[in-house]
Image: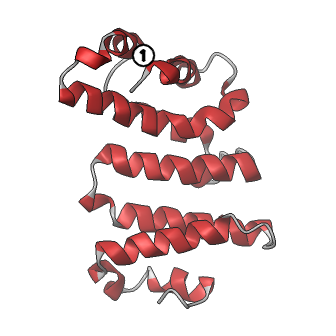
Amino acid sequence: MLGSSLDDLERYLLTPEAGACSLEHWEQLRDFAVGGMQSPGLPDETRLRWGRLALSAISRKERSQTPQQAMTESAHVRAYMILKFGVSNADAARDLHALCSDILRNVGMSPGAGAQLAEGWKSASRDQMLQLRRIKNMVTPLLPLRAFLEGDDPAFQELRSWLELIPRLP
C-alpha cells in the first residue's frame, strides 16, 4: 500500500478495507505522508494533500492512543502546515483557532494551575508529572507559530501563557 500514489492512498481511505488496517499500517502511512508533506520539490497543493493524509492516518490510529498523544501528533502536522502554507479558516487542517481550541480542550487545566504544579513538579506524583509532560508535548508545536498568536482572542492568550511555561515543564 505504501508504494501507492497519493491518489490511490486517498481513495483507499474511503474503502471498507481501510477500517481493518493495523496500528502499524496507520503509523507507516502517517510517516510516509509526513515525508510527502515536507518534500519541498512538490507543489504546495500536493504537499497539503499529503498533510491531510497524515492527519487521516493519525485519526485512524487514535483509538490506540490517549487523546493527548493523538492531539500532539495532529498538532505537529497542523502547525507545520500553518507555518509553511499559511493560516486558512477555510481549511480545517490550517485553521489556527481550531488547532488552539483542540489543544486547550485536551490540556485539562488552566495555565495558572499548570504554573503552580510546575513549581514543584519534581515532587509531584507520577500522574501529575505525566500530565505536565503531555501538556508540554501538545503545546510545543505552537512555538514556531508564536507570531500568529497575537491579539485578544482568549484561546490565543491562554496558549501564549502555556508557551511561556514550556521551559518550566518536565
Task: Please tell me whether residue 126 is drawn above or below residue 153 in the rendered image.
Answer: below
Residue 13 visible in this rendered orientation of the protein: yes
How many numbered discs?
1
Q: Which of the pair 91/140 is nearer the observer?
A: 140
Question: Is 132 left or right of 46, judged from the image as shown?
Answer: left
Q: Where is residue 144 drawn, in percent x and y?
A: 67, 37
Q: Which of the pair 84/19 is nearer the observer?
A: 84
Q: Quadrant of residue 127?
A: top left
Q: Where is residue 104 drawn, in percent x and y?
A: 42, 31
Task: Please tell me whether residue 63 is drawn above or below residue 39 in the rendered image.
Answer: above
What's the residue at 44%, 38% (across, down)?
137
Residue 49 visible in this rendered orientation of the protein: no
What's the residue at 34%, 27% (across, down)?
132
Q: Residue furthest front?
A: 122
What's the residue at 39%, 73% (across, down)?
26
Give the quarter of the figure containing the C terminus. Answer: top left
Q: Residues within 10 Å of mark 1 (few under 14, many from 20)?
A: some
Q: Where is residue 156 drawn, in percent x and y?
A: 58, 24
Q: Where is residue 31 drawn, in percent x and y?
A: 51, 69
Amino acid at the residue labelled 1: Pro
Instruction: State how the image is colored.
Output: secondary structure
Question: Is 26 left or right of 80, judged from the image as shown?
Answer: left
Local SS, label 1: helix
The residue singled out by tag 1 in the image is 111
What's the residue at 44%, 32% (across, down)?
136
